[in-house]
Amino acid sequence: MADATRRAGGRGRSNAPPQQAPRRPGDNPPISQGIGRGAVRTAPQVTTAGPPVVTPAAIQTPGDVAGATAIESQRAPDREANRNIVTRPSPTFVKTGSGGAPLDVRSNYFQLIKKPDMHLLQYRVDFTPEIDHPGVKKALIRVHEKTLGKYVFDGTLLYNTTRLAQPLELASRRTSDETDVKITLDFKNEIQAGDPVYNSVMNLILRRCLANLNMVMIRRDYYDAAAREDVPGHPITIWPGYLTAINHHEKDCLLNVEIVHKFLRRDSALDIMDRIRRSGSDGIKERITAELVGKIVMTGYNNKTYRIDDVDFTQSASSTFHLRKEDRDISYINYYKERYQQTIKSVTQPLLVSKPTRRDINRGNNENVYLVPELCGMTGLSQEQRANFNLTRAISTITRVAPDRRVETLMKFRRRLAETPQIQQELNSWGIQFANDIVNCQARILPTKAILTGGKKIDVRDGDWSRSMHNTKMQVSVRLDHWLVIHPNSMGQQVRSFVQLIKRVGGPQGFNVPEPDYISLEADRTTNYANALKNELPKKSYDIVMCVLRTGREDIYSVIKNITFCQVGIASQVITGRILQGDERKQLSVATKVMTQIACKLGAEPWRVDVPNKPWMICGYDTYHDATQKRAVGAFVASVNPCYTRYNSSVKIHSANEEISPSFQDHMLTSLRAYYLANRTLPEKIIIYRDGVGAGDIVRLMETEVTAVKSACTEAGNRVLSGKYTPGIAFVVVSKRINTRFFAGRKEKPENPPCGTVVDNTVTLTDRFDFFLVSQKVNQGTVSPTNFNIIFNSANFTPEIHQSMAYSLTQVYYNWPGTLRVPAPVQYAHKLAYLVGESIRNLPRPELAKFPYYL
């Protein structure tokens, strides 16, 4: 929990009637109006007015193409939904920058050298009576393959190459309840070759091909069970997989292939429950719920994953539910024994609850899924496991794939597609062919800006200047007159020795640290720290308080931050006993980090970047989502000086847990007010770096947040200037979770590109004003670039300005003497949002806003 080391980032009852019965995992959703999602079902069976019968096995395929049904949903394109939203100023706008050293790189994309050159006919498909579940719709359609010919069906729209008589009505029978279903196909449009809809069709076809590679679909991605690997000495198995997406980029259609990994633990949800029970503490049910809610589990009997939203202690594995198909009651124990040959050992274990997602609700599935903990394997890593250095190191040797291994794996994937006859037959039937090698791109290496300190200019190499900061005066220092240290009584000697090291390393950097007041605690309970803070802070005008914790306890950390930030309005530093251990060299390093954090929280600037000073305001915004509380925290920071090193902050808590902020106008007004107070004028131009937004939210982002910025500027002009104020605005969406990778070096020996590498061609999107930036050097694995999408640019900044500014701002984050993946204001906003959302869950006092107290 230490600041110096803290990282960011009506239930169904027994014997319930069918309409109330909970849905069992692995079952199909309701197949008629008014039938409960919970009744256990076999796969739907469908006939036409007579045979043939669709078998359950046919329903279990991930999706059918070409004479069957399309994939259940367009999983890969979903992640890039609405990618065709145009943010490029005009079709003729040149978004490629200039300057910097040229560099040839390759990327993890394969060109489509041949794609469908046929026109498709689009039909809307309606069912009477109405059918909610896509799987049932596809089964009802599939039996008419001879009539429809080659087709793709996504559950609503059907595309084929054969013109159908109009109007066309087909008849099928749902054998699960012998209901006759009328299918109406209404012609809508002709899709010519080159139409964007072809991307969706090709993605559906490709995902069908992945199924032919005997891969397992887990949630959105396909994983290779045959290549799974156990982590030596730890109960974790890692499944490698592939993420694929076809889209039209600058000049060509490209297939993006990224290597992904799924962590499967060999402990179950029941193991977690038993571990908590054995601890013997009070509030076991509450602790079990807190531990499991929000986690993802995987049921091995059907390889499906579920998010745990609740734990139902009123039901157990011995509870019964109504099996509608057979019109009888059955216990969970017997159901899993009969259906999946799974023997449940604990009959008293409560049930896990997985609530329907928004996609489920849109499909008409609005009831809960109930799971047996014993059969639910945990996925991901627990906090305890993440803190296990040996475990994380062992995992990194598997998941951090070096550039040469990554390219080798990509080429192996391509060969598997080429060497599998069923896949080639499928692709050829649609006229699809991929290049045999990954694409080439032209990159540039931007020059790194020099670091300015109080005593010298530092030239940066490989994005790191930590060694150069020792014994170097800060660019701007501050006074520390009085400070307080609170610690457990048993750690008194360790704490005092560590404080001496802080004083020792502070002096050469121009930050003079006086002797603090010490308060020792007889016990290290939450109440001890709370009482000490409330009793001691009013006695003197302290600048900062440092609290030493024996261990990283979240409850104590939260109380300390809540009292200091929300009640008193003073900066605080929290460290744990763990960082007070080690040899003198390690202790000096840790003391330097703690000293720097303390100084920065009081307003110091350890360094600046050598950039031209402009009357601009640079902003960063990020959102923290609290799934358990169903709310979100939005944090906004904005620079108030011309070298972009001092930031004013504001934070809002939103009752609705949504990404788009309803408070952007308030944030911007607060920031403009702070800028005016510091400069006696308003900024000429404003850049806003917005983190955490998916492509599907860009339209709403434009309609809400960009509009809110304009409105705030208008209002600020009326208040401050008594007239019109229309600064140039650049709104930039910053995306870290992307699937693009770049490889430099020789073809036979790929390596990571150097810091400052920018790519603004080939793999960027033709409808966007965007670029990729590699700003960090990594010692393990393949470096991940960051994508910058300029969705609004009334500031008329050129590509060169956007690229240079983004890279320069990765160098002024004071928690790390090196470059970040994102501009510093984005990281500051992230730290603030995480602090408020995860720990204090309250609004800090406004007098702290001008300091980076959240570091």
Image (cartoon, helix red, strand yellow):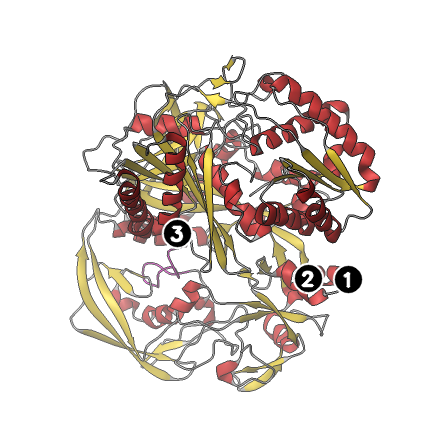
Q: Could you tell me if the residues under marks 1 and 3 are in contact, i.e. CB atoms within 8 Å?
A: no
Can residue 111 be seen in this snapshot? Answer: no
The amino acid sitting under disc 1 is Ser
Q: Position of 63 compared to 15: left or right?
A: left
Can residue 431 be seen in this snapshot? Answer: yes
Label 2 sits on residue: 287
Q: Position of 532 compared to 511: left or right?
A: right
Magenta-span inclusion, residue 179? no
Mark identifier at residue 663 = 3
**Disc 1 or 2, which lies upstream in sequence?**
1
Q: Quadrant of residue 565?
A: top right
Q: Does dot 1 land on a helix, a strand or a loop? A: loop
Task: Locate residue 459, reporting x and y percent.
Answer: 49, 15
The amino acid sitting under disc 2 is Arg
At horizontal 49% and vertical 58% (from top left) the residue drawn is 631
Label 1 sits on residue: 281
- Binning the other alpha carbons within 10 Å of mark 1 as few (below 14), some (14 to 19) or many (20 upward) gives few
Q: Does dot 3 land on a helix, a strand or a loop? A: loop
Q: Could you tell me if the residues under marks 2 and 3 are in contact, i.e. CB atoms within 8 Å?
A: no
Q: Quadrant of residue 470?
A: top right
Task: Locate residue 122, reporting x and y percent.
Answer: 22, 61
Which quarter of the image is occupied by the N terminus? top right
- Furthest toward the top, the residue is 456
